[in-house]
Image (tube, grey):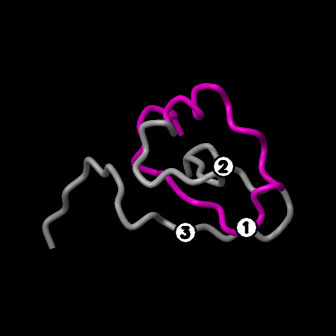
Amino acid sequence: MSCACTTCHIVVEEGFNNLEDASDDEEDLLDKAWGLEPNSRLGCQVYPKDELTVIKIPKYTINQVSEDH
């Protein structure tokens, strides 16, 4: 929840209008996200208010974490 990277980039498919507006910091960071769409947000900054919210995780992300499985 630090709004410091774009690894949590999501696309809000339903319920976008029920979210708080993005901050200037979030908007600046979203410009660095791959596959940006008009309804893109950073998941760490999204707090659904009261309606159903449906999100999509983009096919490509800038994820800096690598896990061995």
Outermost residue, left side: 68
Locate residue 13, reporting x and y percent: 67, 68
Q: Quadrant of residue 18?
A: bottom right
For the N terminus, the quadrant is: top right
Q: Is residue 69 left or right of residue 38?
A: left
The amino acid on which the numbered mark 2 sits, given as a three-letter code, is: Val
Q: Quadrant of residue 59?
A: bottom left
For the C terminus, the quadrant is: bottom left
Label 1: which residue? 53
Label 2: which residue? 46
Query: Dot 2 surroundings within 10 Å: few (below 14), some, or many (20 or more)?
Result: some
Q: Is residue 11 left or right of residue 34?
A: right
Label 3: which residue? 56
Query: Dot 1 surroundings within 10 Å: few (below 14), some, or many (20 or more)?
Result: some
Is the Cβ of the residue at disc 1 closer than 8 Å to that at disc 2? Answer: yes
- What separation in Å lies between label 2 and label 3 (alpha carbons)? 13 Å
Outermost residue, top side: 24
Whether 15 is among the magenta residues is: yes
Magenta range is 1-29
The amino acid on which the numbered mark 1 sits, given as a three-letter code, is: Thr
Above-or-below relation of 26 to 43: above
Q: Which badge, 1 or 2, comes first in the chain's sequence?
A: 2
- What separation in Å lies between label 3 and label 1 (alpha carbons)? 10 Å
Secondary structure of the residue carrying tag 1 is loop
